[in-house]
Image: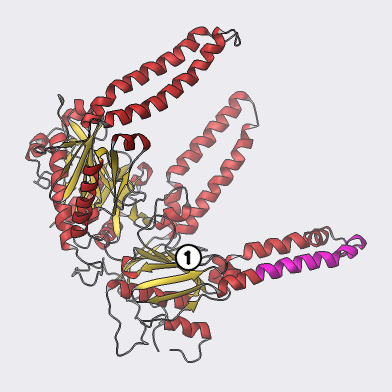
Amino acid sequence: MKPDAAPEASAGADAGTPDGGWLRVHPASPFVRGWVALAAIVFFFFRDTFERMLQGGPLVDEQLAGRAPWLLFGGGVLLLLTGAGYVLSWYFTRYQVAEGYVRINTGFLFKQQRQARLDRVQAIDIVQPLLARIFGLAELKFEVADAGESAVRLAYLRMDEARQLRATILARAAGVVPDPAQPGAAAAEAPEHAVLTVPPGRLIGSLVLSEQSVVVVVGGLASVVLSAATENRSFYLFLIPAVLGMVAAYWNSLNRGYNFTAAISPDGIRLRYGLLDTQAQTLPPGRIQALRVSQPPLWRVLGWYRIQVNVAGYGAAGGNGEASSRTTLLPVGTFPDVLTMLSLVLPDPGTPDPVRIFTAGVNGLAPAVSGEETADAAGAPGSGTDDGGFVTTPRRARLLAPLGWRRNGFSATDTALLIRSGRWWRHLVVVPHQRTQSMALEQGPLARRFRVADLVLHTTAGPVSPRLIQAGLDEGRALLDEQAARARAARKRQTSEHWLDQVRPLVAGPSHTEEPNSQEDPQHG
Amino acid sequence: MRTEAIDPPGITWLRVSPKYITVRLASWALANLVVVALLCVPLILVVSGVWENFPLWLAVALPAVMLVLALWRLLLIPRQVRAIGYAEREDDLLIRRGIFFQRTLVVPYGRMQYVDIGVGPVERGLGLCTLKLHTASAGTNAEIPGLPAAEGARLREQLSARGEARLAGL
């Protein structure tokens, strides 16, 4: 332990002990969290003075002189009450990591006690909003498989404490048994290798070429044309809120995607990003339920792709920017980047030639006429067509999807099912077999006419909803059965929630950056 | 069924109780009769001369179209109920439904998080219940309605026991 550390720092180091005592978060945290309220109170009571200062008048006029004591008194009381509330909330918020659980107690009037099993961890995030970053504080979010709110949020800890706690939780969750001879020893942070970064230029380029830019251009053109045609200048007025919204959206994407770095460690995949607010996510191995590689039409020119994932606990990415950035595994990347990330998510792709099959999945197109029906009849994915083993919509149903029928298809490896779709908006969805929750075969009247059916895989809430569009009926039925058998076999292989217990080959990506990340070492000294 | 079903071949489906048709009829009546009655309001107003400038044909067409749609749905109900089926296989439960829009769902026992049994007022009168399976995915809409209460209880116990034996992590 650091001998010269402040009390809360030594408490933080204790977080590594097997039966850590009850600890408190950093005393400054309620103020960092609630600074808006404090600022609002101050602003409300001193607005008059501010305004006079701006107008260059006397700071105190005679009218105010009578009111000033009351104003000051009222403001002071409010400030004091708020501050006292903050202190109380800080005092009654305590957490503990022990016996395979993380527990947190909050509230002094309405007490709440929460506990979450460490081996059920789905993801751990360390978030630093700008103000917290200035003070060197960080929030730790612990996700279990509940798509609602985070199971445990600890706001705020000192950065090294947060990192230490994350290492401890991950080590416990992985199944590392603390050494009984050294009960005080904290878990060492797992070494990590940076795998890829997204340069700012590419991020900006991806925003310029994104779908919302198309909307901006089209909307702008439409309003110019409209105002010219009707000679009515007021159309420009409608543009102002739209432009403000767009600027905010662009800024949000830039702020969240800036400096995106992916790294691999034995704990799982580490993602770091953020311009003003920074975030560090850790996804333990095997926690990704489904993954989607997608490419908007404009990105094809530059060969860029985006990867989104479903992680239990992150929940659905609604309009909420935070959720959508958390479920983004790669905001924009080249095809080698995509392959690298896929190799991290699926260390064992279950096929001898993963590059070929993933390339076919992302970019491939089935031959228009050649012996495809025979490949369908064989019904065995991977039976050696030119198209990476993808079984696509049969030719008879090409009227249902005149553009997409050669794209829409599936291919199964030993470890995952690959579903591709979309001619212009290209998508490739990858679902590991042991992550499939349930499956359904669906068919409407029109599809029945063409003897095709959709296969839907159900996964946890998130941006990816795997759906195999218009597979041939026989292939679909066969796939439903095979997939049920594969998922069953995969579940049997995966017996423990402790990922160190399962022998898994960890394939680090292309190791052009071999040096371990040189963070400060918060370990036991 | 005359058309080719999307189910995997070689499965004997267990059908739900025919009494479930009554439950569906009750909910159909509740929903559709209220809507038709509401849509009849303009007609009554026009006929009684309160609403002068409302076209009569529209006032007649509105409830009439709705009534035809409702009757169509009414005729479908018995067939829809007969189309609901479930089958317990060794490692998963199959649930099918629908004639026009068919769906065959496979829920592995090891994926079930919990099993619900719900009983509505009409169902209670007929001694039926609705069994619902929940997995970690919200998309799994696994529901077997119209089970006789005893069969529902048996199925729940059976599913819980099998789920426990095969429970896997997420």
Q: Residue at x 49, y 21 (%)?
A: B38
Q: Helix, strand, or loop for circle 1?
A: strand
x and y percent of residue A466 in the render? 28, 46
Residue A422 in view (yes/no): no
Q: Which residue in the structure is indicated by mark 1? A: A278
Looking at the rendered structure, the number of numbered marks drawn on it comes to 1
Q: Residue at x 36, y 44 (%)?
A: A296
Locate residue A314 relative to residue A70 in the image: left or right: left
x and y percent of residue A406 in the render? 21, 36
Q: Residue at x 81, y 62 (%)?
A: A49
Please determine whether, in this image, residue A205 is positioned above or below residue A84.
above
Residue A316 in view (yes/no): yes
In the picture, the quarter occupied by the C terminus of chain A is bottom left
x and y percent of residue B74 in the render? 32, 22
Q: Chain of mark 1?
A: A
Please determine whether, in this image, residue B131 is positioned above or below residue A20.
above
Q: Which residues are magenta?
A: A57-83
x and y percent of residue B162 in the render? 18, 55
Colour mode? Answer: secondary structure
Please determine whether, in this image, residue A224 is positioned above or below residue A56.
above
Tell me which corner region of the image, top left, top right, bottom left or bottom right, holds residue A312.
bottom left
Residue A192 lies within the magenta run: no
